Amino acid sequence: MHSAVYLFNPDYDMAMANFTPYYKAPAEIIHMAADLSVLPVWFADEGCGVKVDCLKQVELFRRQLGEACREEEGRKALTRVLSAVNWTDEWLSARYRPWGWTPCLIHRLRQEGVEESLLPSKEKMQQLRYLSSRQRCLEILPAFSGWDGICGEMKACSHLSEVELFIQERRQVILKAPWSGSGRGLWKVSAESWNMQLAGWASRIMKVQGVLMAEPIYDKVADFAMEFFSDERGEVRFVGYSYFDTDVHGNYKANRLWSNEAIETVLARSVSSDLLHRLRERLEVVLKKVLDGNYQGYLGVDMMVCRMEDGFRIHPCVEVNLRMNMGVLSRILYDRYVHPLSEGEYVVEHYTRDGEALAFHQKMIELYPLEWKEGKMLNGYLPLTPVQEGTRFQAYLQVHWKN
């Protein structure tokens, strides 16, 4: 029996929305999975396996890390990271630790000969799908009803008339499918923009997924998350904050590489640190009750700081990401690899043309060579995944001295 094998499967959200063993991810997501397949090396437990698309990627990655880091101290640190795991491009019969479990991943592992006892049961997957629905936010938000400094309203609509009434009452709203990928399955609508096409989309979501989530649009000033870990005993503990950037469509762009204290300091410009502390303590209790021991692993609760007429408030549960996520990864990357004197960004970049990623990578190596201090990054650019001519997706860190 092999040790656990980590696997990056970024189709998680869309596969859970589809929820069939025969789901096929779009070509772009398949490309993303291949380009970023080495990513788990940065959070995998020592001695475990990492499943990659091709072992040649690992050799290329070793060379590119050596080129990016000219200091001996840094090269030794990065060599330790790469050699702490067992790389494989084969589907081993082992216990897997994917980005998130989906029916199509289980089907693939079963086809590859992975023992049934190592795979989640059909009943377990039904539980995970139930827990991963945006509808679970309705079980979390009431825990903060009446709290000063809190906002956040959400409605699960089962009929088109409910959707239309909510839009008429709130004027500016966002509609969300219960299961969909980040930034997908969402529509920002107003009483003026509502039309037959949007009504058709809403009706299809309610027919297929049962309900449609409706929320007012808030005047957002910051995106952040509280990250947690749910263990095998069902206990839920806070593991840190993440502070991230999104585009106008709500798609994830990058995470700030800041300490937990620094994130609290930034948020405290708008909301009190005491409120943040009470929030995370209450969430540990509420999440334990909602999950009820049926999920083990990392999860994140996305939040917003919103500008209201009477000041700033926190929306405490925009979404729950019941899987490994970029916020947790950025937290781990900062805590393990970035020097306390420094800060920066964790970026997942998407390129549209051959050679674009490679040209960017080569430019960054020249402009921002890595500097190390006490075994951690002090300054510079660190590729987290290999880059070649056909690369479309790349993850990297850019770190600099604190101002």
Image: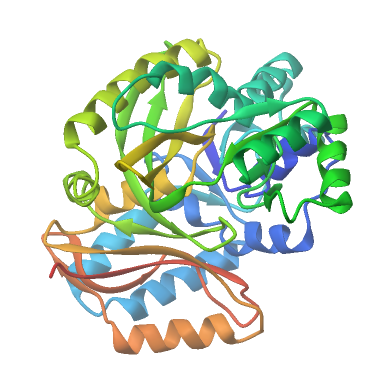
Residue 372 relative to residue 358: left or right: left
Q: Quadrant of residue 115 in the image?
A: top right
Residue 190 relative to residue 6: left or right: right
The location of residue 333, given as percent across then percent down, is 32, 52
The location of residue 160, given as percent across then percent down, is 82, 33
Q: What residue is drawn where x is 87% and y is 39%?
A: 204
Residue 137 makes an appearance in the image:
yes
Residue 109 makes an appearance in the image:
no
The location of residue 212, given as percent across then percent down, is 73, 33
Q: Quadrant of residue 72 in the image?
A: bottom left
The location of residue 104, given as percent across then percent down, is 77, 37
Quarter that holds the N terminus: top right
Q: What residue is drawn where x is 78% and y is 62%?
A: 27
Residue 224 relative to residue 2: left or right: left
Quarter that holds the C terminus: bottom left
Frontmost residue, 377 versus 146 = 146
Q: What residue is drawn where x is 35% and y is 46%?
A: 242
Frontmost residue, 164 versus 114 = 164
Q: Quadrant of residue 215 in the image?
A: top right
Frontmost residue, 249 versus 108 = 249
